[in-house]
Image (spheres, rainbow, N blue to C red):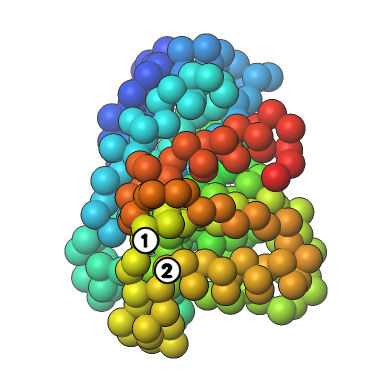
Amino acid sequence: MRDLQKRYQKGRIPFTACRQDPRFSYCLYVPECHQNYPEQTAPLLVVVHGSARTAESFRDAFVEFAERERCVVLAPLFPVGAVVSESSDGYKLQPPRGYAYDHLLLAMVDEVAQAFHTERDFLLYGFSGGAQFAHRFYYLHPQRIKGLSAHAPGQVCLPPQSEEALHAMRQVPVQLVIGSEDRGTERSGLEMGLGRAQLLQMLADALGALGVNVCRQEVEGAGHDGFALLPAGQAFLADQLRNGRC
């Protein structure tokens, strides 16, 4: 009966516990135009929150986008304290990794694909801490991503050098976005003292040097505000859905 009910669910779907690990959950937006038939899979966009865990707010910010572009939006929630051995930043996939948050997200994607007939390869967006997760997930699973939009990460990891990983990464268009007034600096780790804009440029340069199709954008007048940066990200993501190019 639960699966039958899901066939008719549209709009804002409330937080649902992940079957693989019910400590974690996700919410969805399913556009009114979605026809939940096996032969008609819908595009999927995964939207990853920052450290404030405003997953539902980011999901809601993509409602008009989802209706216009006819895609389903999945917003995972990685709550503080779900994994006792992890810090609040554990979900950001910064090495050394503990809990396999990347595989948890893939489990959520598979659940949604089964229940709502969405595609299993997806677009990936993240802001701040979510951008840390997103670009590192891209290194780990580039074959699952159709496009990556990472906004204002506070820390970055440079890309792997293995040719096998790079071959798959080069197939993924990447957008990196920062606000012109984002003055935040990293106070720990190798990036100590560098601003987010400098870190993003470092990442863009490293990806570009390896042949990745990367574009860096700066939003004039915006600070460290994910919602102010969203129009640039949504334009890029819409382009991937429509034309498959950066």
Give the amino acid type for the residue marked by disc 1 in the picture. Asp
**Residue that label 1 marks:** 182
Q: Specify whether 220 is left or right of 122.
A: left
Q: Looking at the picture, tell me which residue is in the foreground, 136 or 242.
A: 242
Residue 57 visible in the snapshot: yes
User: Which one is earlier in the sequence, the residue at label 1 or at label 2?
Assistant: 1
Residue at disc 2, secondary structure: helix
On the image, which quarter does residue 82 sit in? bottom left
Other-residue count near label 1 (Cα within 10 Å), few / some / many at <14 / 14–19 / ≥20 = some
Which-is-in-front pick, marks 1 and 2?
1
Instruction: State the image coordinates of residue 13 (x, y, percent, origin top left).
Output: 33, 26
**Disc ID at residue 196:** 2
Rendered location of residue 46, percent (x, y) = 48, 43
Q: Closest to the observer: 107 or 213?
A: 213
Residue displayed at 33% across by 24% down: 12
Amino acid type at circle 2 is Arg
Assign a secondary structure to mark 1.
loop
**Image spot of residue 26 (x, y percent):** 35, 41
Question: In front: 174, or 193?
Answer: 193
143 up-or-down from 65: above or below? below
Dot 1 and dot 2 residues touching (CB under 8 Å): yes
Farthest residue to the front: give it.
Answer: 221
Residue 25 circle label: none
Q: Residue at x 37, y 19 (%)?
A: 11
User: Which quarter of the image is occupied by the N terminus?
Assistant: top left
Q: Is residue 140 above or below residue 7?
A: below
- Name which residue lies at 47% across and 37% down: 231
Q: CA distance from mark 1 to mark 2?
A: 7 Å
Q: Residue at x 33, y 84 (%)?
A: 188
Q: Residues within 10 Å of mark 2 (few under 14, many from 20)?
A: many
The answer to whether residue 107 is visible is no
